[in-house]
């Protein structure tokens, strides 16, 4: 990681962070990294120790991650809104220290917290005096998986400097996409603009107040933003690019974004915690077709499923068998269509609904429903059915109250007009919401 610190030294006066209206320069980042490095030694945090970092974004939190990486520690970031229970996470990774930050994210308190867990992958990094990063899956399909990365390998993707931008790190610090975003911004000597929370109002206010140029977000958040209409209440003229990923984007939401932000580039991204975030190029701003890959990545499609081979892949799962084949290919479990060099992501294999042997992709049903009046958000999933195997169920968040039976008729009529009969929801539920996790990703379950 020393190359990253050296890059900061080339622009000591440039703003690295705007955190709660506090501007922190790259020169100050370097000073803070050095000070925290000295403090690690004074506290007794030894190379190879596992440090659980309990915090969200702030300049000091980022600096501590860099200091821990330079000290060859294993870093376990856990955000306040984590989707994985802290106790369950640390039972997988083990722990030697807690580093807790105050509410402002400025002052860290270190305390011993010994949880003895032996793991050969972590032991291998420690033996080589290499820094590690442990992230966790959400555990939506079972026990969460601990994902171990070599920090130097993750950072290497950003050694080639790119154009600087002022951006919000939308995904949380315990999500690979969040780590990827903050490294991408700082390695290009851009400016990280933090937000107090990830509500539409807070995001829009930060864009307007600080001239944010890049917003990396999830389709679930952008759907909510479009439904709320809050984007009309703020001056978002500084935006140059909106990127979206982690889940399938509804075409209806993309159409609304294109209409609301005609001068803004809309770019689909693609990545997984196991392999990293690939470079991507959307066919055009209104298209869900995307070309992914870039230096250090290879892709192939086998039986309609996307596979990836990556130079930036994880070291491995801490508590599960490897899902890489003998040649280093990873099965993404994402069903895709192919058109030349472009892919269209249809959805995760685990989300597919099987109705009497027929496949239903939740995203295509949600896309139709989201175009209906009075529907703010929709989540489609399968429930067991005695004769068909599964039936299609739709959960809806409404803008205003509406009788359930009338809504069901509207939803079914719209779906039957555009989709095969078996894809129309048999059950429609009205809920208060939200229909997404703390990571702003769609929740598709009863």
Image (cartoon, helix red, strand yellow):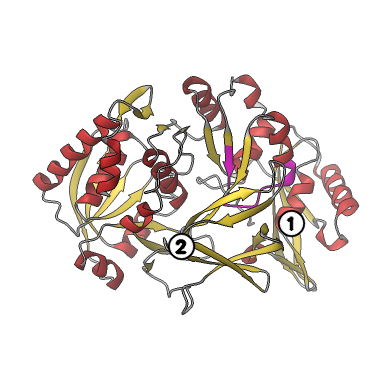
Q: Is residue 261 above or below residue 405?
A: above
Please say whether residue 2 is one of the residues in the magenta stretch.
Answer: no
Taking depth in this image into account, of 250 and 411 the one nearest to the observer is 250
User: Where residue 231 appears, x then y in whole percent?
Assistant: 63, 26
Residue 434 in sight in this render: no
Name the residue that disc number 1 marks: 393
Q: Is residue 369 left or right of residue 222?
A: right
Mark count: 2
- Give the x, y percent position of residue 35: 16, 37
Q: Residue 349: percent from the left, percent from the top?
A: 64, 66
- Earlier sequence position, callout 1 versus callout 2: 2
Judged left or right of residue 222, residue 41 is left
SS of the residue at dot 1? strand
Q: Could you say which is closer to the camera, residue 424 or residue 68? A: 68
Looking at the rendered structure, the secondary structure element under dot 2 is loop
Give the label, 1 or 2, closer to the camera: 2
Q: Which region of the structure is painted magenta?
A: 242-252
Q: Residue at x 44, y 34 (%)?
A: 164
**Disc 1 residue crowd, few under 14, some 14–19, many 20+, Cα 10 Å:** many
Residue at 57% x, 42% y: name it.
243
Residue 228: assigned label: none
User: What percent of the width, then of the height, locates residue 394?
Assistant: 73, 52
- The answer to whether one can see residue 92 in this image is yes
In the picture as drawn, the residue positioned furthest to the left comes out as 42
Compared to residue 74, the image places residue 396 above or below, namely: above
Separation of marks 1 and 2 at Cα, in angstroms: 31 Å
* Quarter that holds the C terminus: bottom right
Q: Which residue is mark 2?
A: 274
């Amino acid at each position: 990681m020393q190359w990253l610190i050296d890059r900061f030294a080339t622009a000591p006066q440039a703003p690295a962070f705007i955190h709660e209206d506090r501007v922190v320069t790259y020169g100050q980042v370097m000073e803070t990294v050095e000070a925290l490095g000295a403090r690690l030694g004074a506290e007794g945090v030894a190379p190879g120790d596992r440090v659980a970092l309990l915090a969200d974004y702030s300049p000091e939190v980022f600096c501590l991650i860099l200091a821990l990486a330079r000290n060859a520690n294993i870093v376990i970031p856990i955000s306040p809104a984590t989707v994985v229970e802290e106790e369950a996470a640390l039972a997988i990774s083990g722990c030697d220290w807690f580093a807790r930050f105050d509410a402002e994210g400025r002052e860290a308190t270190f305390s011993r917290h010994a949880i003895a867990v032996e793991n050969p992958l972590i032991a291998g990094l420690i033996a080589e005096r290499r820094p590690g990063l442990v992230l966790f899956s959400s555990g939506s399909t079972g026990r969460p998986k601990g994902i171990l990365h070599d920090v130097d390998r993750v950072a290497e993707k950003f050694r080639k400097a790119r154009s600087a931008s002022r951006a919000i790190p939308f995904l949380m610090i315990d999500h690979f996409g969040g780590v990827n975003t903050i490294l991408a911004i700082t390695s290009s000597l851009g400016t990280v603009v933090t937000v107090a929370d990830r509500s539409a109002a807070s995001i829009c206010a930060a864009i307007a107040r600080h001239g944010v140029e890049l917003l990396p977000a999830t389709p679930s958040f952008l759907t909510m933003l479009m439904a709320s209409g809050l984007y009309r209440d703020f001056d978002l003229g500084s935006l140059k690019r909106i990127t979206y990923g982690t889940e399938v984007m509804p075409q209806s939401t993309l159409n609304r974004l294109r209409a609301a932000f005609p001068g803004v580039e809309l770019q689909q991204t693609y990545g997984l915690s196991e392999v990293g975030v690939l470079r991507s190029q959307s066919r055009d701003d209104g298209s869900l077709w995307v070309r992914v890959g870039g230096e250090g990545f290879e892709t192939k499609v086998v039986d309609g499923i996307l596979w990836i081979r990556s130079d930036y892949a994880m070291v491995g799962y801490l508590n599960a068998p490897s899902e890489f084949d003998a040649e280093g290919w990873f099965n993404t479990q994402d069903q895709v269509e192919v058109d030349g060099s472009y892919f269209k992501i249809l959805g995760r294999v685990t989300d597919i609904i099987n109705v009497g042997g027929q496949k239903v992709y939740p995203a295509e049903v949600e896309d139709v429903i989201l175009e209906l009046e009075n529907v703010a958000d929709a989540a489609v999933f399968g429930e067991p059915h005695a004769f068909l195997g599964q039936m299609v169920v739709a959960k809806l968040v409404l803008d205003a109250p509406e009788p359930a039976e009338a809504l069901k008729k509207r939803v079914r009529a719209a779906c039957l007009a555009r989709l095969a009969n078996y894809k129309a929801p048999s059950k429609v539920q009205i809920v208060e919401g939200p229909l997404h996790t703390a990571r702003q990703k769609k929740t598709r379950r009863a």
